[in-house]
Image: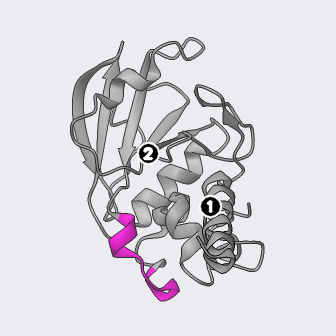
Amino acid sequence: MPVAMKLAVISLVFCYHVAGQRGLGVNYAKDGIDYAKDGVDYAKDGSYGYVPPSLVPTLHSLEQKTEKTITVTCCDRKKAASKGQCGKGIKCEGICEKESEHAIIITSMSTSKNWCDITSGRRGISNIALHDINWCTWSVTHSSQISTYPVCCLHPYVYYNVEGLAGTSGICCVEFGLCF
């Protein structure tokens, strides 16, 4: 393999590794998610994120302002107990009868996974709401669209790949207080 091609492959692998490690205030745990106090912690594969109690009110506020229906699955002991919808001015808070102070956002398109199962072994969490925001990647492709779908500021791909959203000068920080 020519030296230039080797360098290109090494550069791509490095960029992929570095980009894959970025998250919104994230600390990746070896086996999945870690519990941050100030940001969303995403699974190593980026398929879901743990929203700490300090950010759940922000999640609910952004969902209510989002002009799209958001599906919330209520998990009780690793099983889907019920589902509800919010967004388009409808509050997400209280959809789940026995909702904990934590939440999980689903960023993956996978429909074959039992998302309620990811709560197993998580420091006393048995009742949790799963908020599905996997649609964000095709709904927000330009920074002007984030005001229509502000909950997408919590989607790591959107946050870091749509120009003008990330950082302290980005729209997600300035308009919605998500400064990671």
The residue where tag 2 is placed is 47
Left or right of 98 on screen, residue 38: right
* Of the image marks 1 and 2, the number of the one nearer the N terminus: 1
Q: How many marks?
A: 2
Left or right of 148 on screen, residue 36: right
* Residue 138 falls inside the magenta stretch: yes
Looking at the image, which residue is at 28% across and 28% down?
114
> Which element carries disc 2, helix, strand or loop?
loop
* Residue 115 falls inside the magenta stretch: no
Quarter containing the N terminus: bottom right
Q: Position of residue 102 (x, y in %)?
A: 54, 31
Q: Position of residue 177 (x, y in %)?
A: 69, 65
Residue type, mark 1 in image: Val
Circle 2 residues within 10 Å: few <14, some 14–19, many ≥20: some
Numbered disc in front, either 1 or 2: 1
Q: CA distance from mark 1 to mark 2?
A: 20 Å
Left or right of 110 on screen, residue 22: right
The residue where tag 1 is placed is 13
Q: Nearer the viewer, residue 129 or 157?
A: 157
Find the magenta span and give its range: 136-145
Looking at the image, which residue is at 54% across and 39% down?
43
Q: Position of residue 42 (x, y in %)?
A: 57, 43
From this view, report whether residue 70 is shown above or below residue 177.
Answer: above
Q: Nearer the viewer, residue 10 or 120?
A: 10
- State the image quarter where residue 31 is shown: top right
The majority secondary structure of the magenta stretch comes to helix
> Which element carries disc 1, helix, strand or loop?
helix
Quarter containing the C terminus: bottom right
- Number of the label disc, if any, that sits on residue 76: none
From this view, report whether residue 155 is shown above or below residue 150.
Answer: above
